[in-house]
Each structure stands twice: as C-alpha cells, then as structure tokens.
Image (spheres, grey):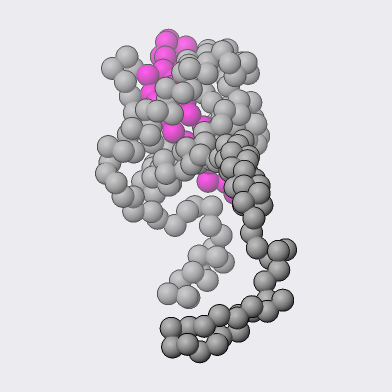
Amino acid sequence: MEESYRNNRGERVMSGSLSKNTLPTKKNLARSFVGALVLIPITLLAQSLAPTPRYSDQAELSKVEEWVLSQGAVESIAPELAAILGVGSDRLPVKLKSYRTSGGISLAFAISTNPKQEGIVLSALKTITDKMKIYSVGTAWLTDRSGTLRRTIAVDASGAKVLPDSSRASEFKNIKAFFVKKLEATGPTITSSPSPRMSATAAKRKEETK
C-alpha cells in the first residue's frame, strides 16, 4: 500500500510501500542483540583455546646459533661422543663457543656444521689429568634451535652413557640460559657470516645476485 503526505511547500509526495515484514520489530532487534552477546564469548573462548605459538618455544636458541656460527671457533667432536649423542659415527665438525668457570668446568655451545648431521651440543665438562691419561667428566646434551632436549649423556673416565633426560633437566635449563645471557651481553646485533651449512653452489648463486 502506498501512502502520501504533503511537504512544507504543500506539494503532494508519494512514499514507498511499507510492509510489516520489512519493519524491524522490537522483538527481532532483541533477538539479534542477544545473539550477538552469545556469539562474542564463544568467539573469545575459541581464541583462548587455540594454541598460540611462542617465539621462545619455537626458536629459543636460534639467535645463539647464528652468533656461534658467525664467531665461534672451528672444532670437532670425537666419534665416540658423536655416536652416543646420535649425530653420526664419524668425527663431527662444529663451530664452538666455550667459557671456563672458576671451578675449571668448560661450558660449551657447539653447532654441527655437517648438513647431514644437524644439531646443537651443550656441555659442561671438566678436564681431568692423571699420570696415565687425560679425560673429561661431566654432562652433554643434544638439542636444536628450539631448545628442546633430545638426549642427555654422562661423560667420565670410562666413556659416555645415555641418561634419562629428567635426571639433568635443571642443569640443561641453566646452561641454555647462560648462553642466551652471553649473547645478550655482546650487544643487540649480530654480524652473521655465511653459514658453513650452505653449499658452494648456493653461495655462488648468492654472490651472482648481488
């Protein structure tokens, strides 16, 4: 049904047809409002339940890794130690940062530079010298850039053996924190050198694009 009315100048103006179905009633508005209120907490609940990746969990040691690859010394891990850590049976080439404590214990952060045997080895070892031989005593841990503990081994005069990860977990946490603090003490930026893991072909292509 069309309705008409007169404007201020007395002209007759036709209005469009109005249907009851097109008019928002108070009841419909109330339903929409309640529906919105119900939807909001459900959405927030879904967001709170969804896993939120944390940078520290995903790449806890990534910056330390870059620092050691850039500025660490070229060393290697003995075959027997590499084997029990699960990173190959040959001597493992690594880049290394090491600090000696007042008690004579060397805290080391070693990164494999063998692309087929990637991994990070943290260790707290003390060198013992007697009349017959020189050996190390302490603990070594295999991890990765996420900082996840992969293997724990004990080292002594008789060799090395695998331990339950829970047995030295607190020491592992402490040595990780030690190297993170060492990195922070060097300054906010790191000048990275080409990773030893990069192939010669990849390095050549990188140079050609410059």
As drawn, the residue found furthest toward the front would be: 10
Measuring 48% from the left and 41% from the top, which residue is drawn there? Answer: 55
Toward the viewer: 36 or 4?
A: 4
Residue at x 64% of width, y 59% of height? 24
* Residue 201 falls in image quadrant: bottom right
Residue under the point 68% across and 79% down: 2
Tell which residue pokes out farthest to the top in this image.
131
Quick check: can you spot residue 79?
no
Q: How many marks?
A: 0
At 27% from the left and 44% from the top, the residue drawn is 187
Point out residue 3 in the picture as x, y percentages from the top left corner.
64, 78
Residue 49 horizontal side relative to residue 108, left or right: right
Q: Quadrant of the N terminus?
A: bottom right
Give the image location of residue 61, x and y in percent: 46, 38
> In this picture, is 187 found above or below 83?
below
Residues shaded magenta: 105-134
Q: Is residue 119 magenta?
A: yes
Name the magenta segment's main secondary structure: strand
Please say whether residue 59 is one of the residues in the magenta stretch: no
Residue 16 appears at what percent x and percent y? 64, 79
**Quarter of the figure with the C terminus:** bottom left
